[in-house]
Amino acid sequence: MMDPQIYPYLAGLVGAIAGSCISLIKERRSGKTLDLEYVRGLIDEQIEDLRTERDKSRSEMVKLRERIAVMESHLRAMEQRKNLEIAQLREENQGLRRLNAKLAAENVQFKARLGVT
């Protein structure tokens, strides 16, 4: 058996240990809270960076779409000019063929007049 006079000292010792444990637990909790706040801050920064990157990507996509639209417009204009030039060349070619046929017929007539075969 223990001496009953030691109980107050043991109670004080247990209280001191409990107080120390409680302060350690509070420290860890506040540390975890700080850690959680720090992690939340990092996550918020990453989210903001991702949003900025997304907005930047959207802006670049809009610019690319505008450039594509301009290029497509230029391409359509070039295609129209090409088609117009082809039509003009076909008309010119038909005229030249008619002229060639006319000159060939005249050539035959001149040869007939000259008696050349």
Image: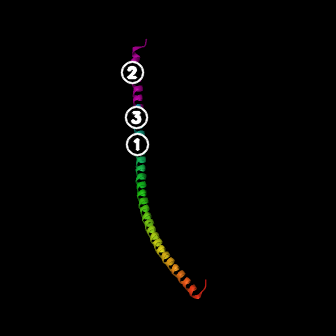
Instruction: Identify residue type, mark 2.
Output: Ala
| Mark 3 vs mark 2, CA separation in Å | 26 Å
Instruction: Identify residue type, mark 3.
Output: Arg
Choose the circle earlier in sequence order: 1 or 2.
2
Give x and y (percent) for residue 90: 48, 73
Image mark for residue 48:
none
Furthest toward the top, the residue is 1
Q: Say if 55 sits above or below 14 in the image.
A: below
Choose the circle earlier in sequence order: 1 or 3.
3
Q: Main secondary structure of the magenta part?
A: helix
Give x and y (percent) for residue 84: 44, 71
Instruction: Give me the residue at 50% from left, 78% from top.
Output: 96
The stretch of residues the image draws in magenta is: 1-24
- Magenta run includes residue 14: yes
Give x and y (percent) for residue 57: 43, 54
Give the secondary structure at mark 1.
helix
Which residue was labeled with disc 2?
11
Which residue was labeled with disc 3?
29
Q: Say if 69 sits above or below 85 in the image.
A: above
